[in-house]
Amino acid sequence: AMLFSQIMSKLLSLGAMILVSVAGVSNELIRQIFETKNFHPLVFEPLIALLPDLTLFNTSTLIFEPELWFFLAAVMIYSLFMSGFYLLLADMIFSRRDL
């Protein structure tokens, strides 16, 4: 996110992060499309390696007890706020001109 914000405007960097997130969620789908189009693995594997593999966080196979839903929601909200805080802090540091 910080790399995108340094080389693009804020709106474009947000759009780039959304595209990277969508590509990270559909990593296996992109790989299957490249394989069906008969691309050589040396062409698309380096591109796939640069994308985050967000399927690691897939919770469709997990079974949560009803008591744990509040805990899961609290952890998710906490991680979102902490990520936002650190991104804002990094943006404030990088926006200083004396570095």
Image: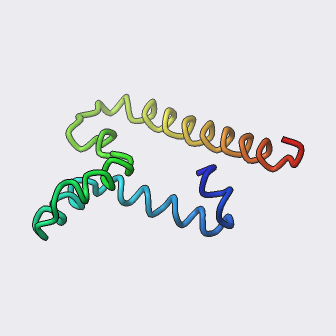
Q: Quadrant of residue 78?
A: top right
In the figure, is residue 67 to the left or right of 30? right
Q: Position of residue 35 (x, y in %)?
A: 13, 62
Residue for point 66% across, 57% down: 5
Q: Position of residue 16 (x, y in %)?
A: 52, 63
Count of numbered badges drawn on the protein = 0
Pick whichever, 56 or 48, lies toward us: 48
Query: In the displayed structure, would residue 84 be above or below residue 27?
Result: above
Pick whichever, 27 or 99, lies toward us: 99
Which residue is at the far right? 98
Residue for point 33% across, 55% down: 47
Q: Position of residue 89 (x, y in %)?
A: 74, 40
Q: Quadrant of the C terminus?
A: top right
Pick whichever, 10 or 73, lies toward us: 10
Pick whichever, 59 or 38, lies toward us: 38
Question: Which color scheme did the rendering employ for the protein?
Answer: rainbow
Q: Quadrant of residue 6?
A: bottom right
Residue for point 42% across, 55% down: 21
Residue for point 29% across, 45% down: 55
Q: Position of residue 12 (x, y in %)?
A: 60, 69
In the figure, is residue 53 to the left or right of 96? left
